[in-house]
Image: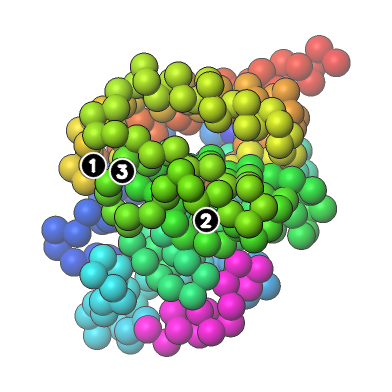
Amino acid sequence: MTTALLTHADCHGHITPEGHPERVERLHAVLAALEGKALDRHDAPRATDEQLLRAHPQTHLDAVRAAEPAAGAGAVQLDPDTWMVNGSLAAAMRAAGGACRAVDMVMAGQARNAFVATRPPGHHAEARKPMGFCLFGNVAVAAKHALEVHGLDRVAIIDPDVHHGNGTQDLVQNDPRILFVSTHQMPLYPGTGDRAETGPHGTVTNIPLSEGTEGDIYRKIVTARILPLLERFAPQMIFISAGFDAHKDDPLASLALEAEDFGWITEQLCAAADRLCAGRVVSCLEGGYGLEGLAASAASHVDALIAAGGRGQAGAGAG
């Protein structure tokens, strides 16, 4: 039992305008930080229409495909933050497809857990709306894949990205089989994520954080709020929307977590997965825009996944 890493060169072909925070250097920094780590490395496949249509309507797929410019035509702007070039669609298809393949690998016992290092991110993409750097809801697509293809009854998505995962919430809140928990700075883009937003089935929990929140406070929230929610819901797989922009040096926000805090958070979620769902964790890269903080935080996160995978291997051998 190992930790799988899924990525693809196509994700480097999503080129944003100069000065844009969601830039290809982000993925370069993450992958450089993971060099030499004990990971089972795989190419992320392209998502199928069947996989995407579990989260998005056909009209959304058609609109995203139609928006992609021809080769050599330059970039097109979908909203104030979201751009496409020729190659962006392939990157987004790899991001969603890689998340689904990670589910397949974990469910088949080919990996204890998995990290999907792809871009563009996904947690702002709503059912019918690209938004906030995102084209498809990668984690939501993967969660629905786990339910519909692998027959799971309950899954949980934990989203520690500094921005509220409005897209994920939009895509999963009507499904009582999916627990969604988001911690995020408020006020901050996209302006959603109030505590009162609990979804029609009470399966949405939003935990707004004040500017300057540090790791000790965040750790108390994980212990007092998030872990008890997981214990009560008893998911059969845990997904992490792995945004690292709550790091103290991130240029787009004002929380104050350290790289080590992301490792600790991951340890706690993996330990919960050990208790609840045979250690099944799938993590997908979301935000993080200061390259040094992103790289250090991603490395800390993946180190915790690898350690959890090792525990699973040791347990399997002992049994």
> Few, some or many C-alpha atoms within 10 Å of disc 3 (few <14, some 14-19, many ≥20)?
many
Tell me what residue is drawn at x 26 percent, y 76 percent: 77
Mark 3 → mark 1, Cα distance in angstroms: 10 Å
The overriding secondary structure of the stretch rendered in magenta is helix
The reply to whether discs 1 and 2 touch (Cβ–Cβ < 8 Å) is: no
Tell me what residue is drawn at x 18 percent, y 66 percent: 17
- Which callout, 3 or 1, points at the residue further toward the start of the chain? 3
The reply to whether discs 2 and 3 touch (Cβ–Cβ < 8 Å) is: no
Number of disc labels: 3
Q: Nearer the viewer, mark 1 or mark 2?
A: 2
Q: Is residue 65 magenta?
A: yes
Q: Give the image location of residue 173, x and y in percent.
A: 60, 57
Mark 1 → mark 2, Cα distance in angstroms: 21 Å
Q: Nearer the viewer, residue 196 or 37?
A: 196
Q: Which residue is mark 1?
A: 253
Q: Give the image location of residue 3, x and y in percent.
A: 59, 33
Query: Is residue 42 among the parts visible in the rendering?
Result: no
Q: Nearer the viewer, mark 3 or mark 1?
A: 3
What residue type is disc 3 on? Met
Q: Which residues are magenta?
A: 52-67
- Which callout, 2 or 3, points at the residue further toward the start of the chain? 2
- Which callout, 1 or 2, points at the residue further toward the start of the chain? 2
- Looking at the image, residue 120 sits to the left or right of residue 274; the answer is left
Q: Is residue 30 magenta?
A: no
Q: Which residue is mark 3?
A: 186
Quadrant in the rendering for residue 251? top left
> Few, some or many C-alpha atoms within 10 Å of disc 1 (few <14, some 14-19, many ≥20)?
many
Mark 2 → mark 3, Cα distance in angstroms: 16 Å
**Image quadrant occupied by the C terminus:** top right
Q: Which residue is mark 2?
A: 169
What residue type is disc 1 on? Ala
Q: Give the image location of residue 254, x and y in percent.
A: 22, 36
